[in-house]
Amino acid sequence: MPAAPSKTRSWTVYIVRCANGSLYTGITNNLAGRIADHNAGRGAKYTAAFGPVTLAWKRRKKDRSAASKLEAAIKKLSRTEKDGLVAGRRKI
């Protein structure tokens, strides 16, 4: 059984690009494991349907609350704004 996540572990907000070109945003405290889950069909229903995925962007946050707030802000962006974020032309 895997160890329970530590309360002091940082969280990562990430954007993956799906095989169909769409972008999916999420948060995790184990990025490599989460990407593997998405690619194995155990992640979100969306990425299971449109995978495999590749990591397009990431940012670490000190806690889950901060990560969740950033995730929500990214999900409000337009596709053009998300593309700019991934390309490094936009900051958030």
Image (cartoon, rainbow, N blue to C red):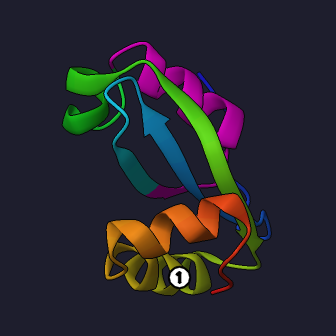
- Residue 4 in sight from this viewpoint: no
The residue that appears at 46% across and 76% down in the rendered structure is 81
- Which residues are the magenta region? 26-41
**Lateral position of residue 92 relative to residue 21, left or right:** right
State the image coordinates of residue 7 (x, y, percent, origin top left). Answer: 70, 68
- Residue 53 in sight from this viewpoint: yes
User: Residue under circle 1?
Assistant: 70
Quadrant of residue 62 within the rendered picture? bottom right
Above or below, comparing residue 23 to residue 46 in the picture: below
**Lateral position of residue 40 relative to residue 60, left or right:** left
| Label 1: few (<14), some (14–19) or many (≥20) C-alpha neighbours in 10 Å | some
Count of marks, rendered view? 1
The residue that appears at 33% across and 42% down in the rendered structure is 22
State yes or no: residue 46 in magenta: no
Q: Which secondary structure lies at badge 1?
A: helix
- Amino acid carrying mark 1 in the image: Leu
Above or below, comparing residue 46 to residue 85 in the picture: above
Quadrant of residue 9 within the rendered picture? bottom right
